[in-house]
Amino acid sequence: MTATIYGGIDIAMKVPPHQYQATVAFYRDVVGLKPITEKAPAIGFEFGPNKLWLDEAPALSQAEIWLEFFTDRFEEAADRLSRAGVVRCDAIEPLPEGFRGGWITSPANIVHMVREPDAW
């Protein structure tokens, strides 16, 4: 049986420091999205059925969007992706020891977390 890969609920926007506060204010004050506060100091917003997380990223000069995939069996999904030529890039952001997931990029260089739903 092949592992299933499907869209997750988290969207991460990595924002450089010179744009961070204005970006937070845009989603909170201008657009009026409902804030997610239970993971402070992380700043998130309800984004329809998804969660939009804003992360300050000092090493970036422009914002990036990172997306999430869920899978029922990470190791099988990782093998499937590897056979298709998808390169893992786990060094992009540290993950906890024993975490059942990893980082990949799409051909357009969009970062994706691939993880089991209960990997945290």
Image: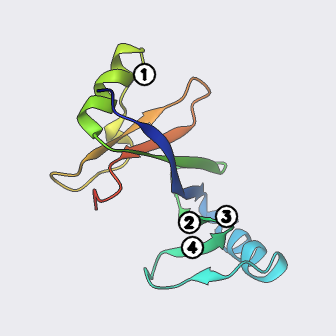
Q: Earlier in the sequence, mark 4 or mark 1?
A: 4
Question: How far apart are the two marked residues, 2 and 1, measured between alpha carbons?
Answer: 25 Å
Which kind of residue does numbered mark 4 sit on? Gly
Q: Quadrant of the C terminus?
A: bottom left
Residue at left 28%, top 52%?
95
User: Label 4 to label 1, Cα distance in Å?
Assistant: 29 Å
Cβ–Cβ under 8 Å for marks 2 and 1: no
| Numbered label attached to residue 44 | 4
Q: Amino acid at mark 2?
A: Trp
In the rendered image, which residue does mark 1 sit on? 86
Looking at the rendered image, the disc whose residue lies closer to the viewer, 3 or 1, is 1
Residue 59's tag is none
Q: Secondary structure at mark 1?
A: loop
From the image, state whether disc 4 or disc 3 is nearer to you: 4
Please state if 95 lies on the left or on the right of 48 as rendered. left
Helix, strand or loop at label 4? It is strand
Q: Are marks 2 and 4 in contact (CB under 8 Å)?
A: yes
Q: Secondary structure at mark 2?
A: strand
Q: Label 4 neighbourhood size at 10 Å, few (<14), some (14-19), many (20+)? A: many
The amino acid marked with disc number 1 is Val
Cβ–Cβ under 8 Å for marks 3 and 2: no
Q: Nearer the viewer, residue 91 or 102?
A: 102
Q: Earlier in the sequence, mark 2 or mark 1?
A: 2
Q: Quick one: label 3 or label 1, which is nearer the N terminus?
A: 3
| Residue reaching furthest to the left | 98
User: What amino acid is found at the position of numbered circle 3 in the picture?
Assistant: His
Which x, y percent locates residue 21?
67, 74
Q: Residue at x 45, y 80 (%)?
A: 41
The residue singled out by tag 2 in the image is 53
Query: How crowded is the residue under tag 2: few (<14 C-alpha within 10 Å), some, or many (20+)?
Result: many
Residue farthest toward the front in the current orientation of the protein: 1
